[in-house]
Image (tube, grey):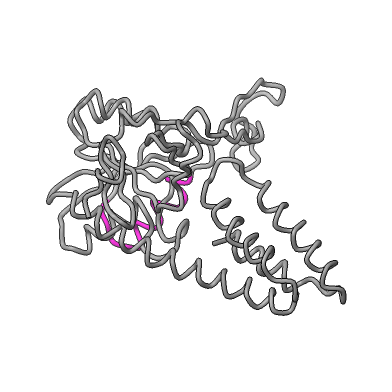
């Protein structure tokens, strides 16, 4: 949605008189947005939709209006999609469960209910007595800054932990269910999500805890056969050696900072989409609607 509205604003800001010059400038703006994030499939899903319009319409004034309309449509679709994901996923959560989640996948990130956090919120709205464990999600702390805030606003009981505490809690049987989002899902079900997700999946498998992914079908990239085909974004070292601009390590420390990791399909119990819940072996016939 951010990409869609960014492209729409870019289109509205172009003031050249010549249609071809306007379209050339718009294409450049679209490419700038395409190049911002290499991992998240939704971004490319939006860019592809906008590029289709650009390739079909030569009158720039008409194109501007259609680009804005398409951005609004993408937003509306996302709201409906998040509701369906939340509704379907909530049926997998039982009364009294303690649910662990990672990163931020609520209304702040996705609009509407959200994806993984949307499932939790919907289950709570069904009247289920649940508790949530929130990973802080190093290094950008989306869990402690955003997910905790959303759960507080929703009135849902939660406990904040550091990422490295999850295994200990699973060993002590303090976790019943794990659900996270996804930035890209390969054709075989391998999934890219915020760094730390893979560790949770392996731990959940070892402790016989269901591990669910909640994501719209726009996250699925069938051109990427496995997780090995997904490009992983690497980010600035300052995210690791500083917190809020305060150094927590030496400035010349060597840093490796991938924003995402790949969770192989064998560790994933099911994938909740707006069209149904996909279970192994992740084919159309595996979808429970």
Position of 58 with respect to 121 (left or right) is: right
Counting from the top left corner in percent of width and height, residue 171 is at: 22, 25
Q: Assign the N terminus to one quadrant of the image.
A: bottom right
- Identity of the residue drawn at 25% across and 40% down: 279
Q: Which residues are magenta?
A: 142-157
Residue 154 counted in the magenta span: yes
Counting from the top left corner in percent of width and height, residue 284 is at: 30, 46
Q: Quadrant of residue 11?
A: bottom right
Counting from the top left corner in percent of width and height, residue 277 is at: 26, 49
- Identity of the residue drawn at 80% across and 62% down: 25
Q: Quadrant of residue 48?
A: bottom right
Position of 49 with respect to 85 (left or right) is: right
Counting from the top left corner in percent of width and height, residue 174 is at: 20, 35
Closer to the camera in the image, 101 or 244: 101
Q: Assign the C terminus to one quadrant of the image.
A: bottom left
Closer to the camera in the image, 60 or 16: 60
Residue 197 counted in the magenta span: no
Q: How many marks?
A: 0
- Dominant secondary-structure state across the stretch colored magenta: helix
- Identity of the residue drawn at 72% across and 66% down: 10
Q: Is residue 58 depicted above or below 154 in this figure?
A: below
Closer to the camera in the image, 77 or 19: 19
- Identity of the residue drawn at 66% across and 20% down: 254
Q: Quadrant of residue 248?
A: top right
Q: Is residue 116 depicted above or below 138 in this figure?
A: below
């Amino acid at each position: 949605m951010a990409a869609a509205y960014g492209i729409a604003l870019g289109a509205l800001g172009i003031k050249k008189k010549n249609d071809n010059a306007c379209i050339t400038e718009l294409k450049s703006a679209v490419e700038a947005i395409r190049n911002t994030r290499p991992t998240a499939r939704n971004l490319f899903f939006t860019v592809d939709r906008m590029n289709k319009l650009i390739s079909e319409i030569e009158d720039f004034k008409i194109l501007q209006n259609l680009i804005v309309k398409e951005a609004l449509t993408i937003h509306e679709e996302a709201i409906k999609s998040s509701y369906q994901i939340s509704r379907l996923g909530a049926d997998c959560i039982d009364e009294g469960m303690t649910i662990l989640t990672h990163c931020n996948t609520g209304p702040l990130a996705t609009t509407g209910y959200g994806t993984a956090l949307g499932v939790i919120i919907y289950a709570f709205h069904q009247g289920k007595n649940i508790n949530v464990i929130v990973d802080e999600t190093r290094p950008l702390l989306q869990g402690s800054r955003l997910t905790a805030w959303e759960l507080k606003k929703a009135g849902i009981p939660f406990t904040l932990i550091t990422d490295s505490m999850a295994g200990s809690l699973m060993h002590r049987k303090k976790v019943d269910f794990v659900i996270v989002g996804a930035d890209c899902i390969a054709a075989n079900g391998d999934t890219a999500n915020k760094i730390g997700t893979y560790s949770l999946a392996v731990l959940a498998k070892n402790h016989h805890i269901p591990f669910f992914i909640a994501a719209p079908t726009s996250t699925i990239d069938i051109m990427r056969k496995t997780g090995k085909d997904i490009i992983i974004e690497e980010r600035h070292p300052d995210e690791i050696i500083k917190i809020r601009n305060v150094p927590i390590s030496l400035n010349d420390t060597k840093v490796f900072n991938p924003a995402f990791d790949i969770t192989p399909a064998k560790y994933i119990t099911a994938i909740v989409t707006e069209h149904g819940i996909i279970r192994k072996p992740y084919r159309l016939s595996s979808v429970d609607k």
